[in-house]
Structures are given as C-alpha cells and as structure tokens.
Image (cartoon, coloured by chain):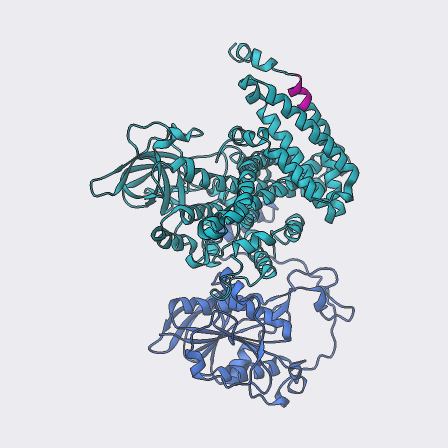
Amino acid sequence: MENFLKDNEDILFHLKHLDLDQLITLKEDNFAEKDIYPHAPKDIEDAKDSYEKILSLIGEIAGEHMSPVAAEVDEEGVKLVDGEVVYAKGTQMALDMLAKADLMGFANPRKYGGLNCPIILMSIAGEIMSRADGSFLNFGLQQDISETINKFGSEEQKQRIIPILASGKETSSMILTEPDAGSDLQAVSLKAHQADDGKWYLNGVKRFITNGNGKIGLVLARSEEGTKGAGGLSFFLYERDEHMVIRRVENKLGIHGSPTCELQFNNAPCELVGQRRRGLTKYTMWLMNGARLMVSGQATGIAEAAYREAYKYAQERIQFGKPIIEFPPVFEMLTEMKIAIEASRTLLYETSRFVDLKECLEHVTEHQPERASDVKAEMKMYTRLANLFTPITKLHNTEVANKVTYDGIQIHGGTGYMKEFNAERHYRDARITNIYEGTSQLQVVAAIGGVTSGTASRFFDDFIENTDFGHCKDLFSKVEKAKLNFEKTLIKIKETEDQEVVTYHSRRLVEMATDITIALFFMRDAKHSERKLKVAHTFIAKMIPRIEMNMNFIVSGESTLLENYQDIINA
Amino acid sequence: MGLNLVVLVKQVPDTQNITGDAMKEDGTVNRQALPAIFNPEDLYALEAALTVKDLYPGTRVNVLTMGPPPAVQVLKESLYRGADFVALISDRRFAAADTLATSYALKCAIEKIGNYDMVFCGRQAIDGDTAQVGPQTAEKLGINQITCVSEINNIDTDKKSVEATRSIEGGFEIVKSGFPVLLTFTDEGYVPRPPSAIRMLSYKNASTEVSTEAFDESYMDGEMSGSAGNNLQLWDIEAINADVEGCGLSGSPTKVKKIMSVVLTSGDIKMVDNDMGGIAEMVHELIADHTIG
C-alpha cells in the first residue's frame, strides 16, 4: 500500500516536532466543539492524532490512486467539449474520491461540513498530493476559495456556498487575471454594474483562469465606473449560469490536468462580497496570499517527486562499471536537491504556522472583543511575519522546484529527456509555480519591505533568543557571523539614496535573509536528529561564502549593470 | 424501502506484500512480520453493501468479523466507510477454528442480528484461500447463495429479490434469487470507497464493549449515534448463543497433517484477454519472436 505521508520521513519528522500546541488551542477555540461534533478533538493530543490520520488518508489516496495515473492525466489533459470543460479521467477520479472521503471541506468550519484543519495541514496535504500529480491543484484551490468566502462573505453567503464546496458537489475558481491585467491587477477592467433593482452584473473577459469551469467564482471586477486604480475594484460571488461562456482552454507547457480557461461574462448576475472598493487591496490579497502558500506546497511536492525519481535512477544506472550515484557530480546534485527540498519544507511549515496564528488571533479579535487587547501585540507580530515569509517561501520553494526538476532530468541524462520517464513531466509542471500567483520577481517586491524595515532582523534576534543552539555551538557562531554580514549589507542599502540601486539589489537581499532563516531552522531541527545536523552543516558550509559574496557585491556599491544595460540589450 | 444487510469481513496478514521473514521455518505464516489488512475481496463486499445503502435509503449495513481483539481494526475501517453497526465475534474458545467452526459461529451471529435480507462476503481470504466460509455459512443458515458475484444488477424490494452477475470461467452468468440470500464478491465490479475523514475522526477512539444484550428490532430502528456508542460491540460465545462444542478446535474436523514449503518450477503462463485487442497483441508478440510469420 503506497502512502505518501508514511513513506516521507521528513514530513513525519516535522509532524513530530512542530510546535502546534498554541495553534491547536486557538484553532479549536479551546475545544469548544468537542461535545457538538463527534469528529471534533477533545484535547491537543487528540487533535494531533486526527491531523496525522487525515494526512495519512490523503497520503493513501495520493500514493495508491493519484500517482499511478498522473502520467495519463498529463497525456490526456483537459478538453473543452460543447462549451464545457472535461477533466482527464484521473483528475475526475481524484475529485470524486476526495469528495467521498469528506476531504473537500478540509479547511472549512465544521458547521459547514468541514474538518476545521489549519493552513499548515493544507500545506502538507498540498505537498503530498502534488507529489502524486503536480497538476492537481483543485484541492488547495477549493480550500482557499471557500475560506475566503468564510472570512469575508455574509452569513447567508457562507451557509449557502461553503457546504456545496465542502461536500465536493461543486468546485470553484478565483477569477482575477485579464489579458491586460496580469501582474498588474490594478488594471483590471471587467465591468460590474449595479442595475436599478440593486443587483450586480458582470461584463467582460477574464483569462488564464484555473478551474474557470467551477460552479462558484470569486471575481475581481471594476465596480466604480471611470476609475483606474485598485480603489475602483470590488469582489463578487458568481454562481455559474448561461451568462458566462468558456471561450477556450489553454494549451500549456505543463500541469495539463488543470483547466486554464478564458471566460466571457455577458451580463452575468453576481453578488457583492464584503465592502465595495476593497476587492483588490483586501480580499484578493488575502486570497492570493493563501494561494501563494498553496503553490509553495505544490512546488515542494513536485520537487520531492523529481528527487525520488532521480535518486532511484542514479542508484540503478550503471556507467563506467558502477552506479552513477557514486560519481561526485551526481551525488553532489542529489545532496543539493535533498537539502533544498528540506529547506523548502521547513520554510513552508513555519510560514504556514505564522499565517495560522495570525488568522486565529484575528478571529479572536473579531469574535471575542474582550480578549482583543490581550492578543493585539502578538497578532501584529504574526501578521508581519506572515507578510514577510509568505513571499519568501513562494520565491524560494518555486525556484527550488525548478532547479530540482532541472537537475532531475540532468541525472537521468538523455533518458530524462524522453516522455517515457516522469522527469520531464515534473520539469514542465514545476515551471508554472514561479510564475502564477505572483512571479518570483513580484515576490521579491512583496518581501523586500519586511527585509529592509527590520522585520527579518527582529525575527532572527527573537528566534536566536528563544532557541537553544547548545547542540551546534560552532555552527551557530558561523551563522551569527553571516547574520552580521547581512546586517552590514542592510545598513549600506539604507544609506543608498538611489532607489534604482536598492531595487537592483532587492533579490539578493531577500535571498540573504532566506539563507539565514533556513540556517536557523535547520539548526533548530538538528536538536532532534544527527542527520539534520549534517544537513545543517552542509547547507551552512555553502551558505557562508554565498552571503559574503552578496555582501561584497552590494556593499561595494556595484552598479555596473545599471550603467550599461541599455547599451547592451538595445544593441 | 431500506434493507437489512450483513457483511462478513476478515482481518488477514498482507500476503500480497511478502517480505523476507514472512514464513517461519516450520512453513507457517509469521503473522508478526506481515501487516494486518482488510481482506481485499471483503472490501468489495462492503462496497456492494454500501452501494445498496446509497440506492435504498434506510438500508442498514451490519458488519461482522470473527477474530482476536486487534481485528476490531477492520470493523472500525467499516464504520469509517459507512457501516451502521459492527460486531467483533471474539472469544478464546473460538481459537483454532477451521472453516466449519468459523461458519457455525458466523451463522449464530447472523441469526442474532435476525431479519436480514442479504449477507455479503468476499469470495475468499488471502490467508487461507479456501473460499469455503461464505458457502458454508449459507448452508448453515439454510439460505440461497450466489458465489463469485462481480456486481449486483438489480434489486426488487417488492418481490424481495436480487439479480447479480456471476463470474464464471470464460464468461459470466446472471442469477436471480429471493431473499434471504448470501452473495460472495470478487474484486471486479466495484471500486471500494475511501474512508470518510469525518467518520474516521468520529470513530477513531471507538473501542469494543461487551454485550450480551439481545439484538432486537427496537435497536435497529434507533438513530445511528455519531459517536462510537454501542454500534461497535464485542460478542462472545454466550452473546451469539453458540454451542461451545461447535466452536474453536472442538468444532473443527480439519487437522493439519503437514505443511510444506513448495517452490513451483513450471514455466510462466500468460493469459490473453479474450477480445480483439488481446488477440492482436498476442499475434504481434508471436510474430516478433518468430513463432509465426
């Protein structure tokens, strides 16, 4: 029996050592539902046991049922037949199975038919399923959308919509992108107008809409006629009817199992969600931050699948009389892949925990005003951490997935270039992850503020103060030096008046902060495992000179590229 | 109209995923070395019952297993998938039962449930591979049996009858029977559903409780409680009104004389699908290895 949870030592390691107690108590509101729902946990240990059981069920569905048909899903792809999307057989099977397993309401409150799982569990589940089939996004997408409705919709909207999605009877989509509004969503022009009867109607075209065939849509549209920026955009709930036409499904490089639709709205009736004019700044940003974590998990899952294929191949492939895994260039690649995946995982889980705690504390503030002042400071801290580490994780994990799947093919050699092996599918599936839900370049824009404002530095200081590094003193002193180099670089950047130079170095700065974060997490994890200590040593050995290089480059005031780029690229 | 169904299941060592130390030196199965699983074909029988329940609301699915206490796991798995009531038939005095003693105990337990319309079980278990328990239980109950069923085609609740497709060598046959009837299932016609996460969390902490209460109709009409409650019970010899002499070793005329580890040496055989695709593939293979052409 294949089980993608139980065969993954690293996920099991984190499940054992993650600090979830505060989160569980908050998420379960001190176990208030234990006498209302038989499936609600009665204490922290019970909740942890339930989490592991749920993930194990997902691991079984992924390993036994989804993974064996992933190549067929890729080959078959989605089709548009008489204006309706038809999923590949394997995709439909997975959706049916998850619905039967009551897993489509994974993150939703129990009162709407859900399991009330925290975001960190969704990240783990998303990774496990994406390892089986990198194109299967529906699970995470559905959670993200239904939770957006749960957070911002009216009680009537929640009661009407969430149970339909939680039961798996219908699916949904987030309808944001337009031909002229990709990274720049402020330019959205799809029109929403309010008729004399007070009802809202949508007119216009949306493009690149994942699962745009879903019954429920959350649409970003321009409600304020004549406006141009973000302030004229509102958020709408659309239930699919004859007023929306799927014009085409895209023919893509990868994730063939995922329908990417072009939609045309022809006076389609819809409902406002939340307040007018907050469509982009509040609701879409929330939705998108959730999606960024989901994609980080997807990327990590694809990378894990690619690593396992490469590792197996390197052991079996004999050249020059021995398995190629014994050659330094090959085992170096494999080691780098494995470390990068474990770094992705620890970043993803810790970031998910920050987001969970932020969400739970926000919930407390909104629903228990008497406790609001007690949790205010903590809520602000986790909000800052969530806002910083969500783009950092998305940037890191999706770039890692691209590198790992690239090296996965490299280890296979010519064989990996052939369709008969999974390596090329992983490579194609990974390629979208650092593009959609915000490109890597936009993640840098989202993260740089937290890096230069001192949020990252404060986090490092707090983490060091609250963590025992007695088991790795030498290593810790090296990381402290690297951290000093990072601080020196920050000082230099803050002195820089030319904004173009600051922007030019943004990615390097964000990557320096990411490196130090990973080093700290690895050292903490090393307390429980000799192997993790070796992982930490090996990662940090390469990190130290990388940080120095970035520091030297930035501190020297280097800007040759900025001076020359126009003459070079326009020649 | 709802039906009353009984499903017989078994916990077995996973003989399909054999590791090195699966057999002891004396040729018997080393149960410690093999994970215990839900007998595969029994999952199809359970799925058939749950499918009937989906089609005929009000149908009650009762699942029974006979085995040592750890066998409660397959009952919990049944609850996770949608069973309404499960009972573990367990008693030291059932130990060393052969198929005859097992089917006697199962017959007593089924009669304790009473008023059943159909009894479902897997065709055979992957440990003993006898395929005897289902048919013997039907004989002891004195009811009809349809073995090797791939799928139920139709149920007539008015006439109280079932029509099923039976797999036979080289084809299939369609058989009809009145209730009560016992059906044994193969792994061909259904796709066993996964456990429901909500039910799994509801029942994960369930444990058996001893019950010698009569299993009467009034219990059957009760609403299924969400928590474990008493829809998971432990039944011993007294609970099922069985005669001690007919159970366990004393009720088992089968005596194992000798166990040998047999290594098969004959060459591979290859089954060819009896359709155009299968035949075409065979012809291509025969041409490729120059047997013909």
**Most foreground residue, A31 or B51:** A31
**Most foreground residue, B94 or A342:** A342
Q: Is residue B1 above or below residue B286?
A: below
Taking A267 as reference, is A44 left or right? right
**Most foreground residue, B271 or A60:** A60
**Most foreground residue, A307 or A150:** A150
Q: Quadrant of residue B263?
A: bottom right
Q: Which region shows up in magenta?
A: A551-556
Q: Is residue A108 visible?
A: yes
Q: Position of residue B4 (x, y in %)?
A: 43, 77
Q: Number of numbered discs present?
A: 0
Q: Quadrant of residue A540?
A: top right
Q: Is residue B290 above or below residue B45?
A: above
Q: Which chain is blue?
A: B
Q: Main secondary structure of the magenta part?
A: helix
The residue drawn where x is 63% and y is 50% is A19
Q: Is residue A512 above or below residue A42?
A: above
Q: Which chain is cyan?
A: A
Taking A175 as reference, is A392 left or right? right
